[in-house]
Amino acid sequence: MVAGPKQFFHDGSARVLLEIQNIRKSYPGQSDRPVLAGVTINLDAGETLALTGESGSGKSTLLHLAGALDQFDSGEISVQGQKLSELNDSGRASLRRGPVALVFQQFNLIPSLNVSQNLAFHARIAGRHDPDWLAELSDRLGLAGLHERFPEQLSGGQQQRVAIGRALAARPALMLADEPTGNLDETASGRVMALMLDLVTRSGTALFLVTHSDKIANQLDRRVHLSGGTIR
């Protein structure tokens, strides 16, 4: 039987938080040209890492694999020592409700919930709802006057800020972000990046971020470049 999830705690006891070891991934009809052809990356607790690469290089695929949204062909990915290959569907879902938070450009807000409810959603599920922290996030993301609005009443940039705030509200051990400021103007982008990096400093959250921006990548502790399915 496939194992369910272990209990996840982020107490700083494990130095290596995310281990991506020799990951290979192909899609049907593309087995001769794998999207990922032996990628290895380690990310320490509290570290920030930018992943860059040309369009179609597999950056988003790698983030999806690290977030247990898809399965790799070979290799192994571990979060806080838990091998993702050992998790069943319930365990993968628990991972994303617990130590891992994801922010993608699709927003994935819940249409029937207003901004305030969307912001608190993941933190409540994870049992880490903190009204004071949520209020700080809301203020710093410029959402304080939008609490009663629903996603359809927001601009794309506003929806993205809600999605980022929702992920940060749970104070995750690992945050996976795919172009998280791609729909924001330069001023708002700078504010959101400052907030993300502040969270890393204050709570030890590791940030693994896909970006095409050198300006953003240069703000993080490390950067790696993905090309031809491998790290260059």
Image (spheres, rainbow, N blue to C red):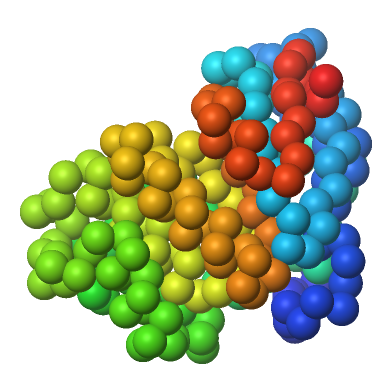
Instruction: Describe residue 67's horizontal placement relative to residue 169 as left or right.
Output: right
Answer with the quarter of the image where residue 231 lies.
top right
Looking at the image, is 185 positioned above or below residue 195?
above
Identity of the residue drawn at 24% across and 74% down = 116
Tell whether 225 sits left or right of 67.
right
Residue shown at the point (87%, 78%) measured from the top left: 13
In the depicted structure, whether residue 213 falls above or below residue 97: above
Residue 53, horizontal then vertical, whole percent: 65, 21
Residue 29 horizontal/vertical position (percent):
66, 15
Horizontal and vertical percent position of residue 135: 32, 79
In the rendered image, residue 228, in percent from the top left (x then y), is placed at 76, 14
Task: Depth check: give the residue in front, 141 or 70.
Answer: 141
Q: Is residue 106 visible?
A: no
* Left or right of 195 on screen, residue 174: right
In depth, the one of 98 and 16 nearer the eye is: 16
How many numbered circles does the render carry? 0
Residue 20 vs residue 192, the one in the foreground: 192
Picture layout, residue 197 above or below residue 203: above
Q: Is residue 213 visible?
A: yes
- State the quadrant of the N terminus: bottom right
For the C terminus, the quadrant is top right
What residue do we see at 38% from left, 42% from top?
A: 189
Which residue corresponds to the image point at 55% horizontal and 63% vertical from the top-left? 198
Q: Quadrant of residue 90?
A: bottom right
